[in-house]
């Protein structure tokens, strides 16, 4: 019988006392246990640490200075004792068969560096369908299939520009591979879609699998970036621009990435106008290249020019996340 690999779980958290207990309970009630559960507390100021102590020796708590979620993940992976590490945000839930499913499949696929999982979103109103059911035609074309997993998906780096189903919560990665590619980039702290930059590097540098069974529940609430679709879209623009400048794997797909940038900028522009948020539309306006030539767009441009006389803020100030020049040094 092939031995299953041990998997450590790393959960970074900051001021999630009201949510993290449920995340840990889900991790502790697996049909097959994690080798260890590491909680990286990113300088919480609420009663997170007090609540965590109720779990005793079943978890290990690492107290950190305020470093941001990316550096907290990296710290957790560095400390982890297992050859594989699963990441989970402190507001999300792993389903009971997560470890059993991942460890069983990875036991016979040592060549895989990263294994992502299908997921469902949930909030106080209920649970949505799984993300992979909405995959566009052709997204998985050419992939190798083994049981519930697909792997070696062709051009996965480029395909994620139009459909990105791979999140940090639930990814199980070889510790050695994670560290070899540098882990998450702390320069993306507070940037929406920050985990996508890591994912792009990971799929470019190693072999990737996706489990088609939804084994993660992603919580949607006012405190996470994905709830604000405009900020999320501009975070994705930021990631794509960074990739074009710094990722060698982006260059063969340059036109696809540029199209993705234009599409997101236009979506934010028209959506902000629809909501009556002229300041947001005006802040995105300089990023629209090439600019449409329709009468509809020209009228909107006139409104923006008039508005900008009274509001000189840029995109990042209006939407409240740090501009590239502050992050890249």
Image: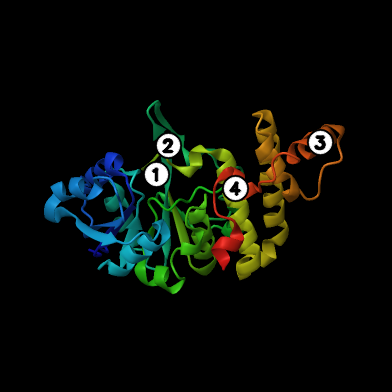
Q: Secondary structure at mark 4?
A: helix
Q: How is the image coloured?
A: rainbow
Q: Closer to the N terminus: mark 3 or mark 1?
A: 1
Above/below status of 140 relative to 172: above
- Taking the view exactly as shown, the residue that stands out farthest to the top is 125
Q: Residue at x 40, y 25 (%)?
A: 125
Q: Residue 59, how many percent across, how many down?
A: 19, 55
Mark nearest the camera among 3 and 1 is: 3
Q: Residue at x 39, y 55 (%)?
A: 171
Residue 319 versus residue 176: which sits nearer the camera?
Answer: 319
Q: Secondary structure at mark 2?
A: loop
Reading the image, the residue beneath label 1 is 213
Mark nearest the camera among 2 and 4 is: 4
Reading the image, the residue beneath label 2 is 220
Would you say residue 294 is visible in this rendering? yes
Density class for disc 3 (Cα within 10 Å; few <14, some 14-19, many ≥20) is few
Q: How many marks?
A: 4
Say if mark 3 contacts mark 1, CB within 8 Å: no
Q: Which mark is residue 317?
A: 4
Above/below status of 267 relative to 287: above
Q: Quadrant of the N terminus?
A: bottom left
């Amino acid at each position: 019988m092939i031995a299953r690999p041990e998997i450590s779980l790393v959960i970074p958290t900051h001021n999630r006392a009201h949510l993290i207990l449920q995340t840990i309970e889900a991790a502790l009630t697996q049909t097959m246990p994690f080798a260890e559960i590491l909680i990286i507390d990113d300088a919480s100021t609420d009663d997170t640490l007090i609540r965590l102590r109720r779990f005793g020796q079943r978890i290990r708590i690492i107290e950190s200075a305020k470093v941001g979620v990316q550096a907290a993940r990296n710290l957790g992976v560095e400390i982890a004792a297992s050859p594989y590490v699963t990441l989970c945000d402190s507001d999300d839930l792993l389903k009971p068969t997560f470890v059993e499913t991942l460890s069983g499949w990875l036991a016979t696929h040592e060549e895989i560096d990263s294994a992502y999982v299908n997921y469902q979103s949930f909030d106080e109103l209920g649970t949505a369908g799984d993300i992979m059911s909405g995959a566009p035609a052709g997204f998985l074309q050419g992939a190798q299939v083994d049981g519930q997993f697909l792997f070696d998906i062709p051009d996965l780096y480029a395909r994620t520009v139009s459909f990105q189903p791979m999140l940090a919560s639930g990814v199980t990665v070889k510790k050695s591979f994670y560290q070899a590619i540098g882990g998450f980039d702390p320069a993306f702290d507070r940037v929406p879609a920050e985990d996508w930059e890591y994912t792009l590097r990971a799929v470019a540098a190693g072999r990737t699998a996706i489990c088609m069974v939804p084994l993660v529940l992603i919580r949607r609430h006012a405190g996470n970036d994905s709830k604000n679709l405009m900020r999320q879209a501009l975070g994705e623009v930021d990631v794509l621009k960074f990739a074009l400048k710094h990722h060698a794997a982006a260059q063969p797909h340059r036109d696809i990435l540029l199209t993705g940038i234009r599409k997101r900028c236009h979506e934010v522009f028209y959506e902000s106008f629809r909501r009556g948020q002229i300041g947001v539309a005006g802040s995105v306006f300089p990023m629209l290249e090439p600019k449409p030539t329709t009468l509809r767009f020209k009228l909107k441009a006139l409104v923006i020019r008039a508005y900008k006389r009274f509001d000189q803020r840029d995109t990042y100030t209006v939407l409240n996340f740090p501009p590239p020049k502050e992050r890249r040094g």
